[in-house]
Amino acid sequence: QAQPVESGGGLVQAGGSLRLSCILSGRAFSSFTTYIMGWFRQAPGKEREFVSTISWSGGTTYYSDSVKGRFTLSRNNAEDTVFLQMDNLKPEDTAVYYCAAGGRRAFTATSYRAPGDYDYWGQGTQVTVSS
């Protein structure tokens, strides 16, 4: 089955940047372009929250209000990979970031914002922003 694998987390000072990558491995018969890809994050003691999602083609992206204007999600369908560029990072961005793959529902401005909308999850990568 499909398996997202994240990389790129680390420690950065406030105002800095990080780029997370997620490659979708383990697909036996399905094309990467059949999957909606998304990112969520979870801080200690908090619920997992939506960060961003991207359409099959990469032409449409949606962001949470907390990261809009600072984060940019893109995908390279030739390399089965999505990239989350995170700029102007803040201490409140500190969390484990999870990549997820789905595709059973229509892609709209309100879909794919809940963990239950995704079928496959990565192990997560830690992002720590120091003040």
Image (tube, rainbow, N blue to C red):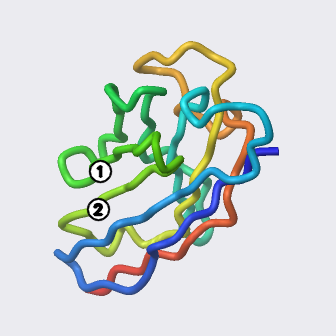
Q: Quadrant of residue 55?
A: top left
Local packing at callout 2 (Cα closer than 10 Å; few below 14, some 14-19, many 20+) is many
In-image side of 118 versus 79 (left or right): right
Dot 1 corresponds to which residue? 67
- Which of the two marks, 1 or 2, is nearer to us in this view? 2
Residue that carries the numbered disc 2 in the rendered image:
86
Disc 1 marks which amino acid? Val
- Vertical comparison of 108 with 100: above or below: above
User: Does 65 appear above or below 111?
Assistant: below
Determine the secondary structure under disc 2. strand
Q: CA distance from mark 1 to mark 2?
A: 8 Å
Amino acid beneath label 2? Met
- Residue 131, image x and y in percent? 25, 85
* Label 1 or label 2, whichever comes before in sequence order: 1
Q: Out of 25 and 119, give the one closest to the viewer.
A: 25
| Element on which disc 1 rests | loop
Label 1–label 2 contact, CB within 8 A: yes
Q: Quadrant of the N terminus?
A: top right
| Residue drawn at the location 56% of the way across and 13% of the way down | 106
Q: Residue 88's spot in the image, x, y percent?
A: 18, 67
Instruction: Write down the quadrant of residue 8 in the picture.
Output: bottom left
Q: Which mark is residue 33?
A: none
Q: Quadrant of residue 127?
A: bottom left
Q: Residue at x 53, y 58 (%)?
A: 22
